[in-house]
Image (cartoon, rainbow, N blue to C red):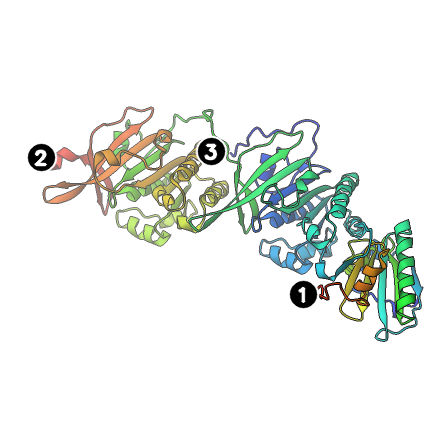
Amino acid sequence: MIQPDQALPAPGIAKCPTGIVGLDEITGGGLPRGRPTLIAGAAGCGKTLLAMEFIVRGAREFDEPGVFMAFEESESELIANVASLGFALDALVAGQRVALDSVQIERNEIEETGDYDLEGLFVRLGCAIATVGARRVVLDGLDALFAAMPSATIVRGELRRLFRWLKAQGVTAIITGERGEKALTRHGLEEYVSDCVIFLDHRVHNQVATRRLQVVKYRGSRHGTNEYPILIDAAGFSVLPVSSLGLTHQVSRERVSTGVASLDAMLGGQGYYRGSSILISGTAGAGKTSLAIAFANSVCSQGGRCLYWSSEESPDQILRNMASIGFDLQPHLDHGRFHCHAVRPALYGLENHLVRLHQLVGLLQPDAVILDPITSFVAVGERFQVQVMLTRMIDFLKAAGITAVFTALRQGAEPAYLERTDEGISSLIDSWLLLRMADAGDHRERLLSVLKSRGMAHSHQVRELELDATGIAVRDAATRRLPG
Amino acid sequence: MNASHQPVSDADHVQSKCADDVLQEARVMPQIPAGLGYVLTLYVASLSPRSVLAIRSVKEVCEKHLGGQYSLEVIDIHERPALAKSDQILAAPTLIKRLPLPLRRLIGDMADEHRVLIGLDLRARADGSDPRD
């Protein structure tokens, strides 16, 4: 489902799979085997975690024991920090699958009395590698050496020797270093690691943090060059390889009912195309969620699965409200056909939502996905970013052949305004329904029109949408407004 | 070798193959009990010219300035890698002054006697400052 950027391993470069979701796709199979990779980034962007997951997955999934040498944290801190991610590091250490060593030097204890080298570091590393038969090595926060040792000249010389030595050992290594002001890392570690450089970034926008990963360099291998969103959750590290869909995805000629027979009639008599993207936009209370739920109910009633992504209402609230117009979703929920994911958009960055969508789709394999409403994402990011994220979501769902329904809230009732999409995604949408409230003498009525629907003969009339305890119906608006 | 004078406890840091290595060390005047004088451990990497220079320099300084009130243990990190880990050795040579407190690490070939004396707290720093400040 996920289409990596041109990710085929180039001949000649052996790859060492990280086992980290998404990263192996971007790098065409993993990190360069038997060589060091540099991971640079600011504090708190996930360098240590990425490196640790490389070691843990290596030991658990690829039968490649590893050594983790930490320059900033103690061994017990390391174990405690990753315990929440389900990495039973202490068990791997006890089983001699992983060796930990923590380098802790107090600079103010040190007095320089002449020439020296860092043979102690080599000896410790060599001992740890021999103890577990390591194939993978991590040197986390290596640039702390510059702070610990009085002579930067000696450290530089020894680092050069260290990387030669690591290559001679044949281990696949990750070196992490703090991001620098001018260079990639504060102490220019990139000077020593020439094979593969990965950059991690951590941005805060509107008090919401998002992390991104970029493969800056990968000698002898093609790799995706975009910035990829990353997510750190209970399962560890995920990188989201988002590629533009292009226009190569298969389109379906199959149709799926909207859940409202009279609306199906407006759409060439058969409803939406399977796997298409549908936008339902309209003013508050005009029935957007009701129409979306009608579709969800229809999908589930035919044995399909539906993921309902609610940005504003809790699952209970949706169930109650929809029961009032005749849709009983409880059985679908009980049978696992209807899955409700309710989360406030402002809780996470846009990328996190995108990653979560990928995860949920991978987990649930739904036939339909409903995002209700997409307008609430605007609170999380800049308009352009929101547009990019929605485009990625639409592309992803299209490529996966999933029918997607998006609802969008519109303020004001001017038709010219209603027919705009703030999110800038109208060109990606296949079918677009517009809902609005209108005064009709003594009452207000909901008006529905089909703004567009690609590939089908659809109605151009404005109809009235009626909601009652038995369900949703679309009627000819004129029949009530002009009696007789 | 007299284990009771072994100043480094490596029991908790035994790492299979490495720790089984035979302990080889040169000990100078091990009879001085801790507390009455200086307790020093010199870590070197094999008997390289730099190691030899460091061992000779440290012995000279001790004889000259400590008047026999010290114990010095010399350890080859290649022979005892587990000790290199537990004693947080990075640089070779490294001389650890365990007693009297505060603990200090002197790194280098010990050729600069002035710096060695400062490191052993036998000579005041030029600016009179404590490096811990």
Q: Residue at x 89, y 53 (%)?
A: B51
Q: Mark 2 to mark 1: distance in Å?
A: 91 Å
Residue B36: % across, % down: 86, 75
The chain ID associated with circle 3 is A
Q: Tell which of A317 and A103 is nearer to you.
A: A103
The tag on residue A482 is 2
Q: Are marks 2 and 1 in contact (CB under 8 Å)?
A: no
Q: Quadrant of residue A167?
A: top right
SS assignment at label 3: loop
Judge from the rendering whether residue B92 lies leftward or rightward of residue A337; answer left or right.
right
Say what amino acid the circle numbered 2 marks: Leu
Q: Are marks 2 and 3 in contact (CB under 8 Å)?
A: no
Judge from the rendering whether residue B80 lies leftward or rightward of residue A209; answer left or right.
right
Say what amino acid the circle numbered 1 marks: Asp
| Discs 2 and 1 lie in a common subunit | no
The residue under label 3 is A400
Judge from the rendering whether residue B14 lies leftward or rightward of residue A20; answer left or right.
right
The tag on residue B133 is 1
Between tags 3 and 1, which lies in front? 1
Q: Residues within 10 Å of mark 3 (few under 14, many from 20)?
A: some
Residue A211, above or below A94: above
Residue A417 visible in the current orientation: yes
Q: Mark 2 to mark 3: distance in Å?
A: 46 Å
